[in-house]
Image (spheres, rainbow, N blue to C red):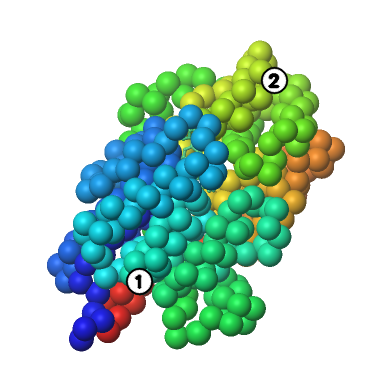
């Protein structure tokens, strides 16, 4: 029994990791087989705190590492040195990390250096193109090499690990994606009387088709991001649509978006909104234009068409359902596919299927069962 897991450290740092780890945090904290602590690197600050408040999670350790526009190398080195203090203090038997951020790969590396076992949640997503998504594709490959237990959301992601990367299949578990656990919980707990929702209702024109937009990927910064904004401007010329864009706090996004789009009365720019309000907004939208990973996973469950402003995706399952279509940041392609959705009810209805390629909302229970069986 010497290898049994007794102490678990759950670590995350950005908005999407927090949303996707929240259901698992709740599950593991309520299981008295373990002593569990939660550590946030706070790679994000405001956008992380929004999630912690919504899910009512109080971290035991907060590394408070966000600095405006810090480089990936600075962030990486600060995570490595600060998490080491926590690992030395708590001495966990298992560290759980999520996905593909700088937080996940650096925390996994630090745990490996201290010979602590690592569980990787949302394991096995791959494009096998190190430039896209950048730097996430390499972050997830690093974490995949270091992890002892791989919680893959789908068969495809498990196959990447077992078949392509030769990882022992006894350590790979298909669990579904915890984002669906979070989404289904969130959908049930939307409070339409919230002031943020009431304020948004005043900004949204119910007589127009609402296009919800997000965008923040590093590989799109620069010319590609400007081309994407030009396409939004063109779409906003139509009288029958309104665009709403909660703008990511990364200054590389904020600067371009506010400079190019803020004068347009058909485009509503708002600050990032908390998860409950964002779910409500996804449900209000006619369709979504995004480069977000999480939104690609959530939209099929909600039955909302998504145009993805990326050239490749590791969420191929969503594309195969027909709900999600890749359009890149190409001006003509964004316009053409958006117009098809707006003008052809047949095309629109074909993309409006409610399907669940990422699970049934029980991923965290499955992950907990695996952890309980480790000996
Ligand atoms: C990070 C992740 C990306 C993930 C995204 C989700 C990496 C390398 N990138 O990208 O995988 O998809 O989060 O949103 O791990 N900022 C704030 N307040 C916040 C959050 C960010 O001001 O609450 C600003 C800061 O200036 C910060 C900058 O955004 O330095 C960049 O944040 P960072 O976490 O490095 O990268 P993201 O682009 O957010
Ligand atoms: N999201 C949110 N508020 C917003 C925009 C997005 O709560 O203003 C949620 C969204 O539902 C999804 C997650 O944040 O669960 C996606 O985060 P992001 O796009 O920042 O990161 P990615 O998924 O691309 O890593």
Q: Residue furthest left?
A: 32
Is residue 290 toward the left or the right of residue 140 in the image? right
| Residue plotted at (50% across, 64% down) | 143
Q: Residue at x 42, y 75 (%)?
A: 148
Q: Quadrant of the N terminus?
A: bottom left
Q: Quadrant of residue 3?
A: bottom left
Q: Which of the two residues, 99 or 65, is positioned nearer the viewer here?
A: 65
Q: Nearer the viewer, residue 208 or 299?
A: 299
Left or right: 262 in relation to 277: right
Give x and y (percent) for residue 89: 21, 57
| Residue 146: percent from left, percent from top | 47, 70
Which label was assigned to residue 260? Answer: 2
Identified at 50% across, 52% down, the residue is: 101
* Mark 2 closeness class: few <14, some 14–19, many ≥20 residues within 10 Å: some
The label number, if any, that marks residue 206 in the structure image: none
Residue 180 is at least partly visible in this image? no
Q: Secondary structure at mark 1?
A: loop
Q: Would you place residue 372 above or below residue 196 in this image?
A: below
Residue at point 57%, 23% (across, down): 269
Q: Which mark is residue 115?
A: 1
Q: Which mark sits nearer the N-terminus, 1 or 2?
A: 1
């Amino acid at each position: 029994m010497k290898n049994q897991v007794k102490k678990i450290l759950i670590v995350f740092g950005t908005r999407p990791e927090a949303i996707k780890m929240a259901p698992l945090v709740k599950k593991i904290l309520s299981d008295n087989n373990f002593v569990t602590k939660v550590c946030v690197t706070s790679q994000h600050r405001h956008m992380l705190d929004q999630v912690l408040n919504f899910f009512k999670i109080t971290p035991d350790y907060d590394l408070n590492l966000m600095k405006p526009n810090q480089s990936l190398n600075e962030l990486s080195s600060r995570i490595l040195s600060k998490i080491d203090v926590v690992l030395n203090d708590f001495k966990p038997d298992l560290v759980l990390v999520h996905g593909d951020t700088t937080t996940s790969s650096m925390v996994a590396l630090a745990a490996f250096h201290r010979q602590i076992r690592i569980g990787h949640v949302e394991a096995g997503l791959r494009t096998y193109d190190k430039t896209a998504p950048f730097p996430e594709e390499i972050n997830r490959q690093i974490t995949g090499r270091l992890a002892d237990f791989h919680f893959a959301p789908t068969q495809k992601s498990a196959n990447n690990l077992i078949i392509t990367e030769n990882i022992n299949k006894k350590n790979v578990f298909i669990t579904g994606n915890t984002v669906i656990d979070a989404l289904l919980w969130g959908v049930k707990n939307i409070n339409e009387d919230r002031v943020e929702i009431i304020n948004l209702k005043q900004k949204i024109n119910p007589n127009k088709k609402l296009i919800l937009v997000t965008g923040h990927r590093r590989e799109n910064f620069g010319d590609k991001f400007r081309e994407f904004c030009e396409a939004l401007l063109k779409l906003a010329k139509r009288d029958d649509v309104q665009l709403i864009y909660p703008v990511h706090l990364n200054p590389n996004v904020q600067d371009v978006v506010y400079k190019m789009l803020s004068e347009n009365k058909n485009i509503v720019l708002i600050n990032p909104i908390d998860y409950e309000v964002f779910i409500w907004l996804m449900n209000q939208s006619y369709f979504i234009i995004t480069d977000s990973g999480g939104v690609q996973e959530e939209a099929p469950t909600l039955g909302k068409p998504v145009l993805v402003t990326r050239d490749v995706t590791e969420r191929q399952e969503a594309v195969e359902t027909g709900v999600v279509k890749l359009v890149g940041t190409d001006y003509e392609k964004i316009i053409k596919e958006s117009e098809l959705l707006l003008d052809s009810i047949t095309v629109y209805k074909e993309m409006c299927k409610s399907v669940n390629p990422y699970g049934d909302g029980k991923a965290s229970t499955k992950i907990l069962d695996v952890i309980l069986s480790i000996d």
